[in-house]
Amino acid sequence: MRARLVRVVVLLAANTIGLFVASVVLDDLTIGWRTFLIAVAIFTVIESVIHALLERTVRTRATALSGGTSLFSTFLGLLVTTMISDGIAITGFTTWILATVIVWLAALGAGLIIPALLLRRTARRVATR
């Protein structure tokens, strides 16, 4: 249970960082700061569900496509989030493509760094006991 909660928190933090980085880099991606946290939560849930469905389908039918499922689920997560939330607005084809790649890369990086930092902090705490 605790591990699942940590994964959810890390995923939310990684997606927050990914969306923030994309909003800083791309002029045509705007974030409504009042509704940003709601948009991040919606994006995270949608992206996670889509990714799980795609991953299961790809694993059984076309394993060569499994690398693209994360990018595609990020795109679909952004698409659905912009449709049902006022927290994020994306305009322009190029911005959609760049936003997908930037959010995916930044969230991937944060998703790797955050757990490493948590593990290091936990190891220090255990060592000082």
Image (tube, rainbow, N blue to C red):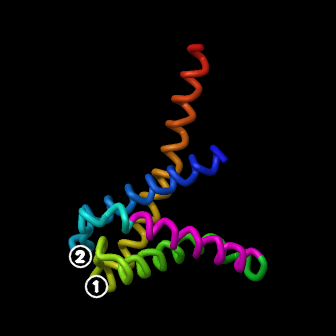
* Other residues around mark 1 within 10 Å, as few (<14) / some (14–19) / many (≥20): few
Q: Which residue is mark 1?
A: 92
Q: Which residue is mark 2?
A: 28
Residue 115's place in the image compared with 60, above or below, is above
**SS of the residue at dot 2?**
loop
78 vs 34, left or right, is: right
> In the rendered structure, does residue 126 fall within the stretch colored magenta?
no
> In the rendered structure, does residue 53 fall within the stretch colored magenta?
yes
- The residue at 67%/47% (across/down) is 1
Which quadrant of the rendered structure holds the C terminus? Answer: top right
- The residue at 42%/69% (across/down) is 101
Residue 59 occupies quadrant: bottom right
Q: Amino acid at mark 1?
A: Gly
- The residue at 71%/80% (across/down) is 57
Q: Farthest residue toward the left?
A: 27
Residue 26's place in the image compared with 129, above or below, is below
- Disc 1 vs disc 2: Cβ atoms closer than 8 Å? yes
43 vs 86, left or right, is: right
Percent of width and height locating residue 89: 28, 77
Residue 66's place in the image compared with 127, above or below, is below
Q: Which residues are magenta?
A: 40-59
| Frontmost residue, 76 versus 6 | 6
Residue 20 occupies quadrant: bottom left
